[in-house]
Image (tube, rainbow, N blue to C red):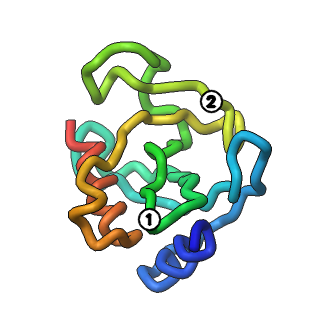
Amino acid sequence: MGIQDIVQQLIELGYEPQIYPESPNYPGGFVSFKFKVPHGRFIGQEVEVALNAPQFPMIPPSGPYIKPHLLPIKPFGPQPPFDGIHARMVPTNDFQYWSRPFHGWNESGKTVKDYICFLRTLFDF
């Protein structure tokens, strides 16, 4: 369960995951992978997506950590895509956190493939 499950599923989907070590505030560490944005204003750009999900698959990853910074830091406000962007400095200082909960997780198959489908929607602007 947790990061190792994500790593295995990413490998099965053809991604090359990288693991970042855990820290006191982020148990289990992070797993990241390269993701080519399929549509929207960043179409074709390759980003690194880092996920922290120590209780995967029971609980989905918290919103993704994206590298490089694509949007201005704007932690407050109710309207994605431009609100809810945080500078959390993890897993490295190069990432920004997009507060984007996966509200349909319990209705999904609770897999990395489901999360990647959700991730695709985050760039649809």
In the image: residue 59, left or right of residue 118: right
In the rendered image, residue 59, in percent from the top left (x then y), is placed at 44, 58
Q: Which residue is mark 1?
A: 58
Establish if 74 lies above or below 46: above
Front residue (pair 46, 85): 85
SS of the residue under disc 2:
loop
Mark 2: few/some/many CA within 10 Å (<14, 14-19, 20+): some
* Residue at horizontal 36 percent and vertical 42 percent from the top: 101
When asked about the image quadrant of residue 77, the answer is top left
Number of marks in the rendered image: 2
Query: Outermost residue, bottom direction?
Result: 12
What is the three-letter code of the residue carrying label 2?
Answer: Arg
SS of the residue under disc 1:
loop
* Residue at horizontal 41 percent and vertical 14 percent from the top: 76
Task: Please report contact status of discs 2 and 1: CB closer than 8 Å, yes or no.
Answer: no
What is the three-letter code of the residue carrying label 1?
Answer: Met
When asked about the image quadrant of residue 116, the answer is bottom left
* Residue at horizontal 46 percent and vertical 80 percent from the top: 14
- Quarter of the image for the C terminus: give it: top left
Q: Which residue is mark 2?
A: 88
Which circle's residue, 2 or 1, is located before the other in the chain?
1
Mark 1: few/some/many CA within 10 Å (<14, 14-19, 20+): some
- Quarter of the image for the N terminus: give it: bottom right
In the rendered image, residue 40, in percent from the top left (x then y), is placed at 22, 42
In the image: residue 81, left or right of residue 6: left
In the rendered image, residue 7, in percent from the top left (x then y), is placed at 57, 74
Establish if 21 lies above or below 15: above
